Amino acid sequence: MGGMVWKALAAGAAVVAGLVANKSVTAIWSKAGKDENVDPQNPNTPLGEALALAAVSASAAAVARTFFTRKAAQYYANSAGHLPEPMRKKEEEAQA
């Protein structure tokens, strides 16, 4: 049962992280005065602009995913009294 709960929490955290990252990138990109409709895959988009958008997007996604996954694991640990199984295994292997 705990594994299914953790999978649901982790999936929910990933979805929320994606939404937050997307909103953050849109806000950062517009504050920088850039066109919000930039398509980094379009060869007519300047390479520097496409790479900058890719870097900002990847950074925002990684930070949001880390934050929300940690919060989901913290919620799980507070509710169940222990970390989710995949995290416990990694922690035990690191201590061994």
Image (tube, grey):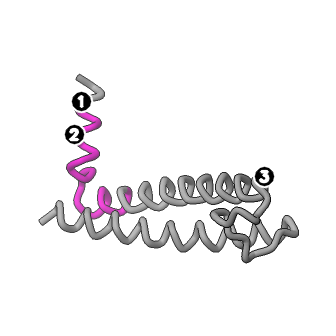
Q: CA distance from mark 1 to mark 2?
A: 6 Å
Q: Residues within 10 Å of mark 1 (few under 14, many from 20)?
A: few
Amino acid type indicated by mark 1: Glu
Q: Earlier in the sequence, mark 3 or mark 1?
A: 3
Viewer-nearest residue: 63 or 55: 55
Q: Are marks 1 and 2 in contact (CB under 8 Å)?
A: yes
- SS class of the residue under badge 1? helix
Give the residues in magenta.
74-92
Image side of residue 42 versus residue 73, left or right: right
- Residue in the image at 24% along x and 30% along y: 93
Q: Secondary structure at mark 3?
A: helix
Mark 3 = which residue?
48
Quarter in which the N terminus is drawn: bottom left
Q: Residue furthest front?
A: 43
Residue furthest to the right: 33
Q: Quadrant of residue 49?
A: bottom right
Q: Tell me the crowding category of disc 3: few under 14, some 14 to 19, or many 20 or more residues within 10 angstroms, Cα based.
A: few
Helix, strand or loop status at disc 2:
helix
The residue that label 2 is drawn on is 89
- Mark toward the viewer: 2 or 3: 3
Q: CA distance from mark 3 to mark 1?
A: 42 Å
Q: In the rendering, at what x and y percent does residue 88 appear? A: 24, 43
Is 56 rendered above or below residue 32?
Answer: above
Disc 1 designates what residue?
93
Q: Is residue 88 left or right of residue 42?
A: left
Amino acid at circle 2: Lys
On the image, the x and y values in percent for residue 94 come to 30, 28
Viewer-side label of 3, 1: 3
Looking at the rendered structure, the kind of residue marked 3 is: Gly
Image location (x, y in percent) of residue 87:
28, 45
* Identity of the residue drawn at 79% across and 59% down: 46
Q: Quadrant of the C terminus?
A: top left
